[in-house]
Image (cartoon, rainbow, N blue to C red):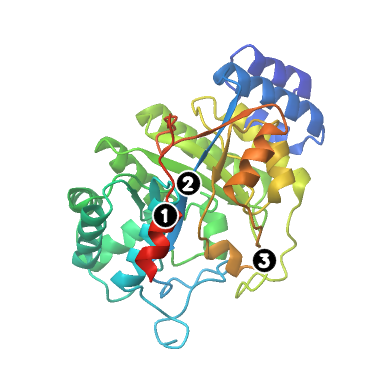
Amino acid sequence: MKPLSSILQKSFNGERITDEECLALFRSNDLLALGQAANAARWRKIPEKVATYIVDRNVNYTNVCVVDCQFCAFYAKPKDAEKGYVLDRETMRQKFAETAAHGGTQVLMQGGHHPTLKLEWYEELLRWAKSEFPMLQMHCFSPPEIIHFTKMNRLSVRETLQRLMAAGLESLPGGGAEILSERVRKQIAPRKATSDEWIGVMREAHKLGMKTSATMMFGHVEQYEDRVEHLRRIRGLQDETGGFIAFIPWTFQAENTPGMQDVPMVGGHEYLKTLAISRLYLDNFRNIQASWVTQGKQMCQIGLMFGGNDVGSTMLEENVVSAAGCSHDVHESDLLDMIRDIGLEPRQRNFYYEILDPPPMKNPEFFRSQAQ
């Protein structure tokens, strides 16, 4: 096995790290060396002294789901009438209006795999949303949702994406990836889209000209080899298409989950290690996001010195991770202070990581008047 220093020197020289070398990095415990190398790689990729963020909202249009993932504390089974819901248009209108009033530029709509909603329902939702809120990017439907739509409507992935794009879909979130290893997926989500299906949806979206994000939820039943496989697959697709706009890793949250409450969760050391290795291995990604949602403000701040260049969303609403017992209250002012505290300039961006200068006007009084 190569010594850690020689692998990090390869990265510094601009050479690509192999899968075997990536695994060696994961097995190393020299966190400071990994962090220094990742920080250097970040500055070579993005020399600007800034850290970006986005103002948006997660809108979970339904929690009814037939997939029964072991790690999910959010979903309701179709027969659970008391817990299950489908948001009505008026509720969505208020959520979207509040987002726009706070200077938001995007809504991230995701939901459960509902057994009766047909594709026309999603098309109508997108058309309505874009007609009433043209200033908001429709960043919606993870690859497993797209696979669910194809099976529900007997359509190909391409046909499904084309119809949704025609209705107003503008980008795909990277949710539902978890770990792109079938060994892991069979344990935690055997009824969900496979690794090949997740990659296939993203490939088709990229071919259609749509940009997407990539994610990884780690720190549960996977091994280091599985994390390497995950990173290898998304790096390979990025080589092929160039369609990923950012990579977002976060840690598994166990509380309230139906089948994984006893799984010991990893801490900040493992999070920072994985974040740093992601920056070093994913040499074809410009943007790596540090997470405050699962890690809190202080760890996110450190993440900006371990390869991250973005802190994600102000997240006016989040339901899935908080359902698993993880809740960190962060306002836009907190993110700005957090970024400035380490000598960086906070800049609001859109989904494409374009700096908004000036940022959209905020008008919370407008939302309050609309809600009365």
Label 3, on which residue?
254
Could you classify mark 2 by the number of other residues whose Cα lies within 10 Å: few (under 14), some (14-19), or many (20 or more)? many
Q: Is residue 69 visible?
A: yes
Q: Quadrant of the N terminus?
A: top right
Residue sitting at 43 percent across and 34 percent down? 245
Residue 55 - label? 2
Comparing marks 1 and 3, which lies closer to the viewer?
1
Q: Position of residue 183 (x, y in %)?
A: 56, 56
Q: Amino acid at mark 2?
A: Val
Q: Earlier in the sequence, mark 1 or mark 2?
A: 2
Q: CA distance from mark 1 to mark 3?
A: 29 Å
Side (left or right) of 26 relative to 236? right
Residue 363 vertical position relative to residue 125 in the rendered view, above or below: above
Residue sitting at 24 percent across and 53 percent down? 130
Q: Amino acid at mark 1?
A: Thr
Q: Amino acid at mark 3?
A: Ala
Picture quarter containing residue 43? Answer: top right
Q: Is residue 61 visible?
A: no
Label 3: element kind: loop
Label 1, on which residue?
99
Q: Nearer the viewer, residue 219 or 368?
A: 368
CB under 8 Å between callouts 1 and 2?
yes
Q: Residue furthest top?
A: 13
